[in-house]
Image (cartoon, coloured by chain):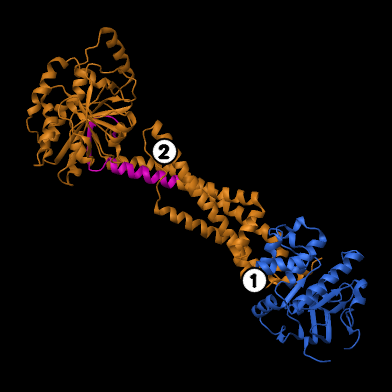
Chain colours: A blue, B orange
Amino acid sequence: MTGNPLICVEALMHRYADSVVLDLPRWQVEAGRHTLVLGPSGSGKSTLLTLLAGLLTPSSGKITVDGFAVGEASQRERDAWRARKVGFVMQRLHLIGALTVEQNLALAQTLAGLPHDAARIHDTLARLGVGEKSKRRPHELSMGEAQRVAIARAVLHRPALLLADEPTSALDDASCDAALDLLTSAAAESGATLIVATHDQRIKNRFSEPLILSGPSSTVGASA
Amino acid sequence: MNILQLAFAYLLHRPWLTLLNVLLLALGLATLTVMLLFAHQAEERLRRDSKGVDLVIGAKGSPLQLILSTVYHIDVPNGNIKLADAETVLADPMVKRAIPIALGDSFKSFRIVGTGTAFLELQNAKIAEGMVWKLPLEAVLGAEVARKTGIKVGTQFIGSHGMGGGGEGHVNAPYTVTGILAPTGSVVDRLILTSVESVWKAHETVAPPPDLATLLRGVMARDPNVAPKEPAKPAGADQGGAAQGTKQGTKQGTAKDGHAHDEHEGHDHAAHSAPGKEVTAFLVQYASPLAVAVFPRMVQNTGALQAAQPAYETARLLSMIGFALDALRIFAGVLILASALGLLIALVNALNERQTDLALMRLLGASPLRLAAQMLAESVTLTLAGAILGLFLGHLGTHLLGQWLEATRQVQMTGMLWLPAEWALLGGALVLGLLAALWPAWRISRQDVAPVLARR
């Protein structure tokens, strides 16, 4: 394979208390190759994503994302790096209820250390089909609209890595497809590599070479 | 979306809770502010009005009442003294200056005070229009009297018996206004000043028909401060001339220093020689501070006289008010403590409600410090709003209280005043806001994000 891998994981192990929740000897993802992380609940998918985002420090092993040694950096460095390089879409969408859609996105820009860019906000919302919802509050949005806003927020700062945790498990089949279309097109548009963690079997055919986690001992579904 | 904008958004997201917290704090601070303004102005006023008066000589009775009636003009006098009695003590070299005060009449509930022009000097009152009284039944109005009654220089008015107004009018002895004083901010603003002779004359020349006389006696029986004047009245016929006749004046012992006001005082005191004449009190200035050790006792031992020291009585009065002020202070303290607890509860609630919001902000790149700062900003915004509202309400309350007091008690009080101590209130409120947020902020900064985000 050509090019440097965007994600490079070596001998990664993470424990909560005494139990090992993630054991990943080796895993690489090339830039631009959208990848599925598949596995049942408790197989360590969410843990892998939070480790990739630098929200957790691994018990042992190495994680490098886009040349940045996530596992070894200080918390402050990781916060700053994550703000610039990582976009995150969660199953629970976590929009801030006190703020309008537009303000939610503006806050993301501020926290990422970017200048306020209203044009970018409106542009991103419009491209995801929720341009006219910018003055609404989260509780006034439908589930689908809220997800679009969450995706807009995740790609607003053009991250290198877009992480999605169970983005489809609450959706019906049609919405499930639409959500994945949105995610892939948003990732493509902002130049991000998409990593989707899910137990939703419906979407495994949309990605080649999924990483299949089955608990403490994991296997790579197909070698790269 | 900076820290403050987000703080506002969160506060406005729960408008009623925010309003309640702000109100709770505002009430406590308003109470403290009212107390501060009230105490300050009461003390200020008591000090200013009694400035330069070392001792008051008046009739036996309550010393506090004597001071309140003749220095502050808020109580009724406790009686009159005979000039002859006063003369003997005032002749003492320890007395630098003695200013007579003759009370008993009023006009539209403003007191008519028979005194000497030295009183104007003592109170630092300047004529704004017209000139000082010269002849009996000429009067000078305090600034507020002129403003409220609308009386102009050159016009006449009729004084009536008693302090509250509504007493019998001295129709045969109308006063002529010769001047109006510039505002002083002291009690003088609310007084009508004239010579002591005028007060005597007003009573002497009353020759009421029999039915009126009966009425008058009825009024006097109700009004104890008028009664002592009664003995002077029957002698009126032959004393009218005496008062006039002594206008050229025999120089009195009370006017020993060589100042220009000697002559005026001479006029007033000239009347002393008339037997049976009475005044309400003398305001005494000592020639030497040492007099304080000897002179009051000397006066106390002289017949029917009483000596009261404004400084001492004022302190006594303030200690009486002080009790009420302390109670108010404790009350305000409890209110503020309650508001601090309310604030803490609100913040801890917000913390629990917003765990996912806070975790999300960490995910979006906010440092733990940023989240702690967010909580502090919210708390301080809230307390600042409470403090500003509290100070505003406090000033408004004092202003309204002042208007009510002015209408009912003739006490001037304003809310249009900023005291340095109020900065301390503002600062204290901010510190309170910071303290209340300290623990929630610390908890936020220690929050582990991953489990919160992973929660399903």
Classify mark 1: helix, strand or loop: helix
Residue B41 belongs to the span the image colors magenta: yes
Q: Is residue B398 above or below residue B340?
A: above
Give the residues in magenta.
Answer: B34-63
User: Residue A5: horizontal and vertical position, in percent?
Assistant: 78, 88
Q: Are marks 1 and 2 in contact (CB under 8 Å)?
A: no
Which residue: 53% across, 46% down? B27
User: Residue B207: horizontal and vertical position, in percent?
Assistant: 21, 12
Residue B429 belongs to the span the image colors magenta: no
For badge 1, the amino acid type reads Pro
Which residue: 37% across, 38% down? B412
Left or right position of B428 against B128: right
For badge 2, the amino acid type reads Gly
Check disc 1 and report the residue beneath it.
Answer: B368
Q: Nearer the viewer, residue A2 or B452?
A: A2
Identify the image quadrant of residue B147.
Answer: top left
Q: Earlier in the sequence, mark 1 or mark 2?
A: 1
| Label 1 neighbour load within 10 Å: few <14, some 14-19, many 20+ | many
Left or right position of A124 against B12: right
Q: Is residue A55 above or below residue B293?
A: below
Q: Nearer the viewer, residue B94 or B250?
A: B250
User: Where does the C terminus of chain A fall, quadrant-wise?
Assistant: bottom right
Q: Is residue B59 above or below residue A164?
A: above
Identify the image quadrant of residue A208.
Answer: bottom right
Which chain is mark 2 on? B
**Residue B291 visible in the displayed image:** yes
Asked if badge 1 and badge 2 are on a common chain, one would say yes
Check disc 2 and report the residue beneath it.
Answer: B402
**Residue A17 visible in the displayed image:** no
Which chain is mark 1 on? B
